[in-house]
Amino acid sequence: MKSPRSVRALERLGRVRLSESFFLREFLYSEISQIEGIPNIPDNPGIA
């Protein structure tokens, strides 16, 4: 699986359920990455 390159692809990735309680989108946002201007998108979503 390639790293998402569009907003729509990132939205789809965020909807991946990691467990009964968690979705990947809960881990994609980081206040520190926003302050530093660093995108918090996994390089290899297949292993994320």
Image: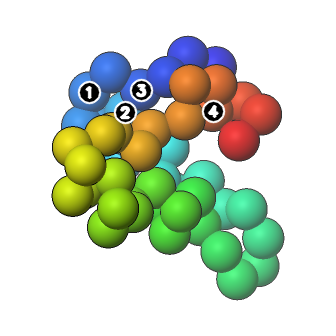
Check disc 3 and give the amino acid type: Pro
- Mark 4 belongs to which amino acid? Pro
Query: Is the Cβ of the residue at disc 3 closer than 8 Å to that at disc 1?
Result: yes
Q: Mark 3 sits on what residue?
A: 4
Q: Which mark is residue 21?
A: none
Q: Of the numbered discs in the image, which one, if any, rests on residue 9?
A: 2
Q: Nearer the viewer, mark 2 or mark 3?
A: 3
Q: How is the image coloured?
A: rainbow
Q: Tell me where residue 8 appears, x and y as whole percent.
A: 28, 37
Q: Answer whether labels 2 and 3 touch (C-beta < 8 Å).
A: yes
Q: Residues within 10 Å of mark 1 (few under 14, many from 20)?
A: few
Specify the amino acid type for callout 1: Ser
| Rendered view: 33 above or below 21 | above
Alpha carbon separation for disc pair 2 and 4:
11 Å
Q: Which mark is residue 45?
A: 4
Residue at the bottom extreme, as displayed? 21
Q: Secondary structure at mark 2?
A: helix
Per the model, the C-alpha gap separating discs 4 and 3 is 8 Å
Q: State the separation of the CA atoms marked 1 and 2.
A: 5 Å
**Residue name at image x 32 percent, y 67 percent:** 31
